[in-house]
Image (cartoon, rainbow, N blue to C red):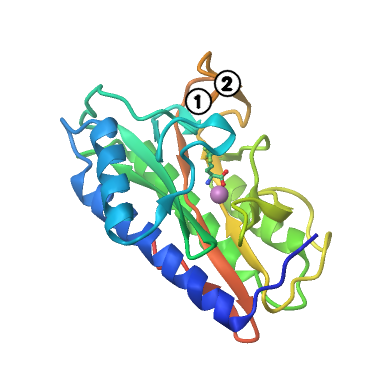
Amino acid sequence: MIHIKSPKEIEIMRRANAIVAEVLQKLSELAGPGTNTLELDRISEEICRTRGAKPAFKGYRGYPFSLCASVNEQVVHGFPNKSTLKEGDILSMDFGVLFEGFYGDSAVTVPIGRVKENARKLMEATKESLFKGIEMAQEGNRLSDISHAVQEWVEQHGFSVVRNFVGHGIGRELHEDPQVPNFGPPGKGIRLREGMVLAIEPMVNEGTYEVDILDDGWTAVTRDRRLSAHFEHSIAVTKNGPDILSGPA
Ligand code: MF3
Ligand code: CO
């Protein structure tokens, strides 16, 4: 069942997502050669606490950290750890909060120092594909118009979209209906209505879209171990078009 949010609820979700955006912005500034992602996890919690929010992922289905930190071939749900990031890596950071009863959820992928051309292009195409999807989040469009726009953009750039993980509705729960795939034909699924809030989150691979899960039970990696990138925004469908609650990436 899809929960429609009132304008008041959307304003709370904007505040929740502003905290997420602040955390991701700060971590993006800190992430560089020599930083470790366990340190970033600690900082994410600290900012969260000072803003009166709770990290959304810690304890969710047993996930052990506040931040998801996925390096290079890691697609999503990477565990923060003490190994240092090195020049040329790409780092996907996914973060969520619970604030005044509502969730916020957003993700970015950032370069560590100077990165190769292919890595830069992958990150750029992934971020753009998110905005192509967001543009389709208009009242009266169908859900899969978002999915299709993401997939088209990604494949036109020679990359592939992950099938095993999808975006989602978000509100009083981190994951609400509907699921928002990043692939599929246009014109299918529910009609988008004012008050729907969606987390749109393309995960894009350099090579095959297939993924493996590591022995930790969480970390998703590309089957061919080539690079992967991830961007996510929580957006509200409004009469005036999509409203990005998690701020510009
Ligand atoms: N943005 C991701 C999602 O919506 C992050 C979830 S991590 C988890 O699924 F640990 F909470 F599962
Ligand atoms: Co999400």
Q: Nearer the viewer, residue 121 or 93?
A: 93
Q: Farthest residue toward the bottom?
A: 240
Q: Residue at x 68, y 70 (%)?
A: 196
Image quadrant containing the C terminus = bottom left
Image-based side of 238 in relation to 225, left or right: right
Which SS class for mark 2?
strand
Q: Is mark 2 within 8 Å of ligand 1?
A: no
Q: Nearer the viewer, residue 70 or 169?
A: 169
Which SS class for mark 1?
loop
Mark 2 and mark 1 in contact (Cβ < 8 Å)?
yes
Residue 172 seen anywhere in this rendered image of the structure: yes
Q: Residue at x 50, y 25 (%)?
A: 219
Q: Position of residue 57 (x, y in %)?
A: 49, 42
Q: Does residue 153 sit above or below 239 in this rendering?
A: above
**Which mark identifies residue 213?**
2
N-terminal label among 1 and 2:
2
Residue 32 lies in quadrant: top left
Q: Does residue 93 sit above or below 221 in this rendering?
A: below
Q: Residue at x 65, y 74 (%)?
A: 5
Residue 223 seen anywhere in this rendered image of the structure: no
Q: Is mark 1 within 8 Å of ligand 1?
A: no
Q: Residue at x 17, y 33 (%)?
A: 33
**Which mark identifies residue 219?**
1
Q: Position of residue 215 (x, y in %)?
A: 53, 13
